[in-house]
Image (cartoon, grey):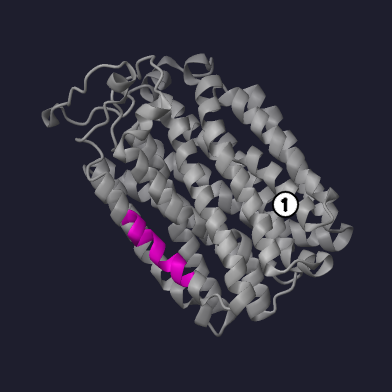
Amino acid sequence: MVVALIFFATTINYIDRQVLGILAPDLQREIGWNEIDYGNIVTAFQAAYAIGMVVVGRLLDKFGTRIGFAVAITAWSIAAMGHALARSVVGFALARFSLGLGESANFPASIKTVAEWFPKKERALATGIFNAGSNVGAIVAPLTVPWIALTYGWQMAFIATGAIGFLWIFFWVALYRKPEEQKRLTSEELKYIQSDPPDPPVKIPWLTLLKHKQVWAFAVAKFMTDPIWWFYLYWVPKYLNTTFGLTLDKIGPPLIIIYLMADVGSVGGGWLSSSLIKRGWSVNKGRKTAMLICAICVVPIVLASQASELWIAVALLSLATAAHQGWSANLFTTTSDMFPRKAIGSIVGLGGMAGAIGGMLIATLAGFILQLTGSYMVLFGICGSAYLLALYIFNRLAPQLVHDRLDLIHGARGQRHNPIRRSEGLASPRSAVGSIG
């Protein structure tokens, strides 16, 4: 039930943000954008997303996921519907900024929910399942948005998709509770959920988090790879339109295939590392092996700009999006490997902010490159190389995800650092120090 709730929240999140990308070629002609204008509209969303990630992550740690998630999806649903009122570049930029603020809560809240409801050994798979909602949303959008826009107008496409969030809020408020507050659980189920040692009740200041290289490892990896996903989300429909002449009534099937494969990658990537760990691999080795495989699978996307056939381009994009989502499922899960639950919302927020800043840069860069050259070669080259470089940096900053553990709790209490001996083994990240896998 919990996975289903956050899966559908993520689905709605991506339906709402995907509408603009699908309608972009037609809106660009109707309203008169150029490539730089479109890049600036996307940048407005990324700027708000970056701001929201930091603020929302901290608020979720303070007020909890039940209240925080409900407020966030209310805000982004209203913002999504508000796009229907926009008539200029500035109007769309304001609507996207508002949407970014609300949608920034989705992943910090979802990751925190997974940490509350699942023991460490199952988190990557749970994360992969809910993260697959992003691809389902990206599939549902091209199935429905073109038809709504062609039948009722582009304004109704924003209104209809934005309204879905209010239905989700009803189920979330009615059904979601923390495990210890959920009366439907048996004592055996609660014991299994809480099988990792609990976190001590202590606040962890921002400065304490920022002192640790493992925090920067996650943030740098998000900064380098999140923008690639943003680029796919906002520019793939335009790429297919300009390169292969796909119009609004024909763009659905290619996008559905691309994001259906991304779904497979999301669940498969989470399953892979969880399976390796259950077979006796260390969390460090299992997570990073899965991330390496995903990083290698992205590399062929560099050939997409030279694809002469539509379905060759679709195949390359499908492999790349699947690999990204497998990478993302494992990267997200390292936060719950590394840190105590009390800090997860803040850590994911910091990483999300870094990813959104990277998204701002890629959006602006893409607008200028396409306006000046009309070619996607440089952009796909960036996409193909980012993950291997990100993994290298991540591994340098966090070479061990279990034995070199963060003494976050001691730091928060103002105590001197007391290294934990390697012989003490694989304690839970939710214990007094919070390890990285």
- Asked if residue 12 is positioned above or below residue 322 in the image, the reply reads above
Could you tell me the amino acid type at mark 1? Ala
x, y percentage for residue 401? 26, 40
Tag 1 secondary structure: helix
- On the question of residue 393 being in view, the answer is yes
Q: Is residue 226 above or below residue 369?
A: above
Q: Quadrant of residue 148?
A: bottom right
Of 355 and 432, the residue lying toward us: 355
* Left or right of residue 133, residue 158 in this image: right
Magenta-highlighted stretch: main secondary structure? helix
| Quarter-of-image position of residue 103 | top right
Where the C terminus falls, by quadrant?
top left
Where residue 231 appears, x then y in whole percent?
56, 61
Picture quadrant where residue 194 is located: top left
Q: Residue 176: x and y, percent?
A: 58, 24
* Residue at x 51%, y 43% (from the top left corner): 353
154 or 141: which is nearer to us? 154
Q: What residue is pinned by disc 1?
A: 93
Q: Is residue 347 magenta?
A: no
Which span is picked out in magenta?
Answer: 380-391
